[in-house]
Amino acid sequence: MTTPDDLLQRRLRQLPDAPLPADLWQRVNGARGRIRRRRIGIAATTLAFATVAALSPLMRSPSPDAPRAGQPVVAEVPATRVPATVEIELRAIDRALQAGYARNATDDELEALWTQRRRLLAGNDDTAGTPGPRGLRI
């Protein structure tokens, strides 16, 4: 005996296949390419992070307490110590210069402050009692 469902199934099998859009395979291949590029990007990012994590212990700078016997001296930097009174006056002049620039002071006002600053530093050339140059290590 034939049921209405069987008749419907037989009728549907006899129908021709639906036509596919002309650009269907181009769209499928484009989507596959985007997925492949995304996977490659994720893999590259993961590899970069893993490399940084693996090499980061090698890139740490030595602790300040570490012996510096094997490190080369790159440059000699003189270490001079400015007396406290000169340092206080110098900071006051620097603050006055900053305030002058902030309020658009005239060139004459600023030049007077610069002259005072140069005079203060020039009068402080006494380097006796200061330690000699020390090496700058990298």
Image (cartoon, rainbow, N blue to C red):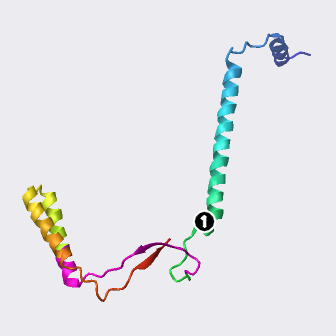
Residue at coordinates 63% horizontally, 44% vertically from top-left?
Answer: 41
| Magenta range | 68-90
Depicted 68 relative to depicted 115: above or below: below
Q: Is residue 61 left or right of residue 111?
A: right
* Residue 77, picture quadrant: bottom left
Q: In terms of depth relative to the viewer, which is nearer, 42 or 98? A: 98
Residue furthest bottom in the image: 129
- Quadrant of the image containing the N terminus: top right
Residue at coordinates 36% horizontally, 77% vertically from top-left?
Answer: 78
Depicted 75 relative to depicted 100: above or below: below
Residue 123, position as x, y percentages in the image: 18, 78
Q: Report which residue position mark 1 lands on.
A: 56
Depicted 48 relative to depicted 58: above or below: above
Q: Is residue 25 magenta?
A: no
Residue at coordinates 82% horizontally, 11% vertically from top-left?
Answer: 11
Instruction: Residue type at mark 1: give it.
Output: Ser
Residue 82, position as x, y percentages in the image: 26, 81
